[in-house]
Image (cartoon, rainbow, N blue to C red):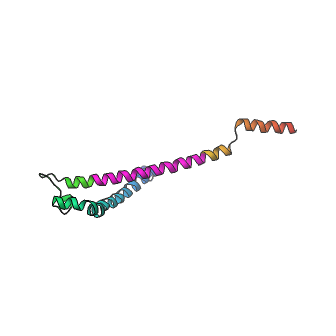
Amino acid sequence: MIKELKEFLFKANVLDLAVAVVMGAAFNAIITSLVEDVITPLFLNPALKAAGVAKIADLSWNGVAYGSFLSAVINFLIVGTTLFFVVKAANAATALSKKGKDEEETEAAPTQEELLTEIRDLLKEK
C-alpha cells in the first residue's frame, strides 16, 4: 500500500498538479494585490469617493455588499486575460517546435521513391 502511495504521489501528473496549485495561489495573491493596491487607488478612487466609501469592499446597497463581488470580478477578468495570453503563447511555441520537428523528420527520412532511385543508380553503376 505504501508502495502504491509512493507511485501515485511521485507520478509526473501529481507533481505537475501540485506545482500548478502552488503557482496559481501565488499568481492569485499577485493579482489580488494588483487590484486592491494599484487598480483601485488609481482608477476607482474617484468613483469610491463619489459613493462615500474608502475601500471597494465597503460598497453596499441595501445590505448587499457588492464591492467584494466587484473586486472578485476584476480579479477574474485580469486572471482570465493573462491566462489567455499565456496559453496562446504556449500554443504558438508548441506549434513552432512541432513544425521544426516535422521539418527535421522530413529531411532525415528519404521517401520511398528517393530510396528506389538510389538503389537503381547503384545497380546501374555495377
Residue at x 25%, y 55% (from the top left corner):
71
Q: Quadrant of residue 116?
A: top right
Above or below for 95 versus 49: above
Residue 110 placement, left or right of 84:
right
Residue 17 covered by magenta stretch = no
Above or below for 113 versus 34: above
Q: Residue furthest right?
A: 126
Residue at x 74%, y 38% (from the top left corner):
115
On the rendered image, what quadrant is the C terminus found in? Answer: top right
Q: Position of residue 32 (x, y in %)?
A: 30, 59
Residue 77 placement, left or right of 4:
left
Q: Is residue 9 among the parts visible in the rendering?
A: no
Q: Position of residue 43 (x, y in %)?
A: 28, 60
Q: Is residue 26 among the parts visible in the rendering?
A: yes
Instruction: State whether the magenta stretch is mostly helix, strand or loop.
Output: helix
Q: Position of residue 72 (x, y in %)?
A: 27, 53
Residue at x 81%, y 35% (from the top left corner):
120
**Total numbered badges shown on the rendered structure:** 0
Q: Position of residue 54 (x, y in %)?
A: 19, 63
**Residue stretch in magenta:** 73-101
Residue 125 placement, left or right of 48:
right
Residue 87 covered by magenta stretch = yes
Residue 102 placement, left or right of 68:
right
Residue at x 45%, y 49% (from the top left corner):
88
